[in-house]
């Protein structure tokens, strides 16, 4: 079957392949519709139409009277992460944020089949539109927020570490001064306070890192 997709020069030719699939059976035309195909969609009660790409899955395309499409435009009013670049007669954009259901009766002339690369772009646009995936801009923004949060956590952590170190140094110096036998009780007290500072530092550090991440 793959050989049918190639023209006489051996190049991949989805348009020729799809034209073969759209066959005549007696007096009735049987048009096979597949995801990624681009057709003209007739306007209601009008003979004119506009191009759109089929985005519904092939089970629906085969069994239902309605299919889902994303219309194509040559120049969108604005650039959105849901837009997918595809080729119609001219380079066009699939508006994946505006998927609509249309009757098969409105499907008119076949134009071409999207390449795998174009379908991948359409899938990405649909995923962003449905909230399944995030755009590159959103991911970059969240990464920046996470980086800023980690930097703030590191700053607070460094400040606490310095404060705890200062307290421990003070306690150690005091231990030296109280190293005489008659000051044993004071040494025990100072050591206990030092351990409290160490434990407090570890708990605060763990909480900060946990909250930020």
Image: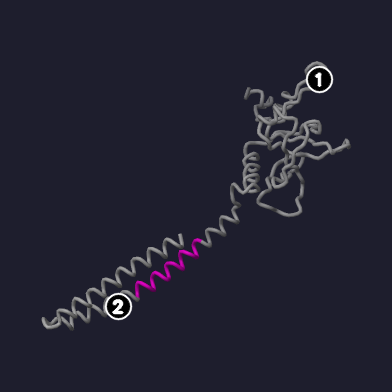
- Identify the coloring: one colour
The percent coordinates of residue 37 (x first, y second) are 71, 34
Q: Which residue is mark 1?
A: 28
203, above or below 120, in the image? below
Furthest residue in direction right, as rendered: 46
- Residue at figure coordinates x 66%, y 23% from the top left: 4
* In magenta stretch: residue 154: yes
Specify whether 56 is left or right of 152. Answer: right
Furthest residue in direction left, as rendered: 181
24, above or below 52, in the image? above
* In magenta stretch: residue 124: no
Q: Nearer the viewer, residue 171 or 114?
A: 171
- Residue at figure coordinates x 42%, y 71% from the top left: 156
Residue 185 at least partly seen: yes
Q: Which mark is residue 167?
A: 2
59, above or below 147, in the image? above
State the SS at label 2: helix
Q: Quadrant of residue 32?
A: top right
- From mark 1 to mark 2, how far is it between C-alphas? 91 Å
Q: Nearer the viewer, residue 77 or 133?
A: 133
The percent coordinates of residue 189 (x first, y second) are 22, 77
The percent coordinates of residue 169 (x first, y second) are 26, 78
Q: Which residues are magenta?
A: 146-162
Q: Which mark is residue 164?
A: none
Provide the major secondary structure of the magenta segment: helix
- Residue at figure coordinates x 30%, y 68% from the top left: 199
Q: Nearer the viewer, residue 61 or 12?
A: 61
Residue 93 at least partly seen: no
State the SS at label 1: strand
Q: Are marks 1 and 2 in contact (CB under 8 Å)?
A: no
Figure quadrant of the C terminus: bottom left
The percent coordinates of residue 67 (x first, y second) are 73, 34
């Amino acid at each position: 079957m793959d050989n049918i997709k190639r023209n006489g020069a051996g190049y991949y030719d989805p348009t020729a392949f799809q034209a073969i699939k759209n066959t005549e059976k007696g007096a009735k035309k049987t048009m096979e519709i597949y995801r990624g195909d681009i057709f003209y969609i007739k306007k209601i009660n009008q003979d004119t139409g506009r191009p759109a790409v089929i985005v519904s899955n092939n089970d629906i395309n085969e069994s239902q009277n309605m299919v889902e499409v994303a219309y194509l435009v040559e120049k969108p009013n604005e650039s959105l992460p849901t837009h997918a670049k595809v080729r119609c007669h001219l380079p066009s954009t699939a508006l994946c944020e505006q998927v609509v259901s249309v009757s098969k009766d409105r499907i008119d002339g076949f134009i071409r089949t999207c390449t795998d690369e174009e379908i991948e772009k359409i899938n990405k646009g649909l995923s962003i539109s449905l909230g399944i995936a995030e755009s590159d801009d959103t991911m970059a923004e969240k990464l920046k927020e996470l980086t800023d949060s980690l930097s703030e956590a590191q700053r607070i952590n460094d400040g606490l570490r310095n404060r705890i170190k200062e307290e421990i140094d003070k306690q150690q110096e005091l231990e030296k001064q109280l190293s005489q036998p008659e000051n044993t009780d004071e040494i025990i007290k100072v050591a206990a306070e030092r351990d409290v500072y160490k434990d407090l530092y570890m708990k605060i550090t763990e909480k900060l890192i946990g909250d930020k991440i």
